[in-house]
Amino acid sequence: MMNQGDDPTGGTAGEQGRGAWLAGLLVFLALGVMPLVGLAQDVPAASATAYRDIPGLGSRNMVWVVAQLHLLLAGFVLGVPIFAWLCEIVGWKTGEKRYDKLAKEFTKLLTSSYATTALFGGILLFLLIGFYPKLMNYLADVFFPSFIVYCLLFLVETATLYLYWYGWDAMQDSKKGLHLFLGFLLNVFAFFIMIVPNSWATFQASPVVISEGTDLQRAWAATWNPTWWPVNIHRLIANVVLGGYICGAYAGIRYLSAKNEEEREHYDWMGYVGNFIGVFGLLPLPFAGYWLMREIYQYNQQMGITLMGGFLSWLFILQAMLIGVLFLGSNYYFWLGITHRIPGSEVKYRKPMMAMLIILLLCLGVWMTPHSLVASLEEARKMGGTHHPLLGVFGVMSAKMTVANLMILVTFMSFIMYWRAGKEETATWAKVARSLMGGVLGVAAIVVIVLGVWGYFVPAIVRINYFSVAQVLIVLFVMLTITPLTALLLRSAKTTTEMVWGKMPPRAGYALVLNAVMVILLMTLMGYARSSSRVHWHIYGVMRDSSQYAYSPALGYAAAFMSLNTFLFCMLVAFIFWVATMGDKAKANDAGGKGHGAQGTLPAMAGGAPALDERK
Amino acid sequence: MKGGVFLKPAILIVGVYVFLKIVLPLFTAPLPASLIFLYLALTTTGIVIFATLSGPSTDAFFGPIVRFLTGEGQGGAAQGARIAVLLLFPVLVGWQTYTSTAPSDQPPAENRTIHPAPPGEYTGLSNPVPNTPENVMTGKGLYAAFCSPCHGGNFDGKGPASRGFNPPPANFSDPTTIAMLQESYLFWRIKKGGVGLPIEGMPWKSAMPRWEVELPDEWIWKIIMGEYDGAHQKPRTWE
């Protein structure tokens, strides 16, 4: 399997023919099945069993692990095609072969993860049907039409993926346009594959149940529930982040174990791209999360407070910590890129980096300060409650939104700094442009802070609907003005120092791995928050959980499961990647026999690349 | 000897500690240890990140540490110090383990949730009493009679009876109390009081009386209006 991609697949025409045939069949199937949907009503009522369990393991625990692994795999599988396709476009537009190669490498990881994702989906389905017959019966009753749609989507997605992957080399030249179109289709189908099950999960949290109407109308109403789109958008972005950071980690590990200069250069660059994609997705993520929380709170005060002020609010302190590490890790990687890939730039950038670091840490300090503090009796008495008179103000949304926006700004500027490093702007208006950018940035930061402080003195709804939105728009405005301006500036700039790839120290590779682990932990954490915010309901307000597991586990217990899931997922991914790249390794070893320069053949991880830690 | 590279970080950490532990409490309540620990951890992270930004700075920072720990070309005092560290480290770990497991008369740290989720039956309610100046006035009058002894005539939580309670009566003019909540939430809190809180709100820790016996619902809604008006706050709404 892993080697086939490198063999030219014969007969493109045949391939295409088959594709068209398959697509036709699917459309036919879709039309054929739809009328059957109506028959669903005639199915006799469910058996009396409401729950099954596996003693010792516990049904909830098993579903927890399998569902989380499925979701993580799915996130990866849906995120990667987005930027694989974008990379392919970049490669095609610029004619730079390395982008095409990178896109292909991403897609290789994709094909091998795809089957595992489906496998876990299958296991999850069997477990759900087995453990929760009553609930599943209800959901099937509401959602049967979308079950069918889902299956069809899966068929077309699989077919498209195979065509996209196996046709890569065959469609390289004259048929590149078609291949790109396939990539586009792949993403469209993938998007629908994500949002259809999202409707089932969000229905459980914010159900819309209508009693009259046809099956299709009922399913449609249930699908368009209040949290459906917020979750769709949030997950879409998060998948890109997950995909980016995992590819970054993959590159990091390959970099650490690289045995020759060429590999080191390639994986250094791939790590850079992965980190860039991760950061790129990370920037809008807090906005999307904020919107989601707002919709939840508005939908139901109880659920909103359970998450943000009640017993789940501690999860958001953990979340702040993980996101903080992610921001720090990503910026650290950018900065290491500046000091190591652009020789001699350290002196110039040390001060700005320090300033950015300090801002990030201050913001993080605010973000991580909880509203209700952990305090001993003695301390609480002195503070007058678990709510500090001064620092307590950091505990609420106005402060959190403000620092999140500032951290996004800083990270964006890290990237701009990286982009401009080693180049000298020659345009006559460079000076004006630079001060303009500085001005925009400074004003934006001040306005964001002012709005944040002012937010305490206006009614909640004004803050939520106007101030927070304004903050987000300001940050977006900064990005949308500075990016094209920088691009324009750099068009005429002359490069003073060439970027050298493959010179990053080992800790850069480890930073990439750390980022990936943080994202995975973050997703397991928020996955828990999402499902436990329903508290003792299977379907909020509609179907109660009457099993023996109708309680919220202690946070420590939950945290242990999050770690377990993260660990298992990392192992799975490592295994999949290992299998997928076994072929390359064998080839590289063949080639390696001929000797690859004077560099030691020990990987950097094993301390075999002292040159990477060289003193400049 | 190698004081140079470590001097600034050390000053920074000590400075942050002194600021949080001694300077800040001059102006406000002392910070709990958990928060000081958090901020110090962030400071340390920053130092490590900054020190490892480039090859030379990493060497300058970790070189002496590594050399000290590996004992490379050391003798005399340095060697002695190294052995001392070697011995002290396990002792430190042991001491830490002991203090965290030994029984003590200190009650465990608390994480009382200030705003736990309300019961479902209250979440959809809206204030049935029209917001007229008379109703607001009536509400303020009722507030003055029933609530101000604890929550204060100025709605600041500093009523004459407030000093005896831990946690203290809520300060309604603080933007992080009622301004974040919907009216229905207050209705629940006033009706059911401290004992009506769910377990994460530590119902045994609140002196807030349950008013459902003394006050009819309509009065409670009026008090809510008077309370927001008096504290110059607006309830959370969605339009």
Image: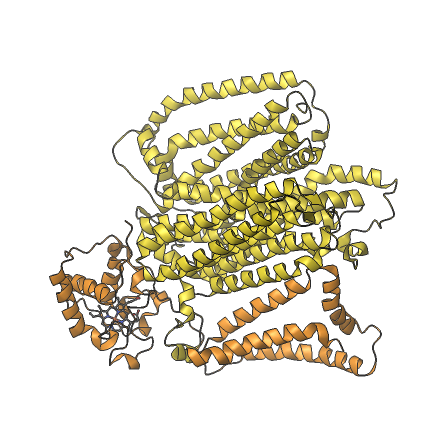
Chain colours: A yellow, B orange
On screen, residue A65 versus residue A97, left or right, reads left
Q: Quadrant of residue B164?
A: bottom left
- The number of numbered discs placed on residues in the rendered structure image is 0
On screen, residue A34 versus residue B91, left or right, reads left
Residue at left 41%, top 72%? A390
- Please say if B227 is above or below A596: below
**Where residue A597 sits in the image (x, y, percent)?**
86, 45
Nearest to the observer: residue A591 or residue A333 = A333
Residue at left 63%, top 56%? A332
Q: Quadrant of residue A225?
A: top left
Nearest to the observer: residue A154 or residue B10 = B10
Screen quadrant of the N terminus of chain A: top right
**Where residue B159 sits in the image (x, y, percent)?**
25, 78
**Where residue A402 sits in the image (x, y, percent)?**
45, 57
**Where residue A86 sits in the image (x, y, percent)?**
59, 35
- Residue A193 visible here: yes
- Residue A565 visible here: no
- Please say if A193 is above or below B88: above
In the displayed image of the protein, which residue is found farthest to the left? B134
Screen quadrant of the C terminus of chain A: bottom right
Residue at left 33%, top 77%? B166
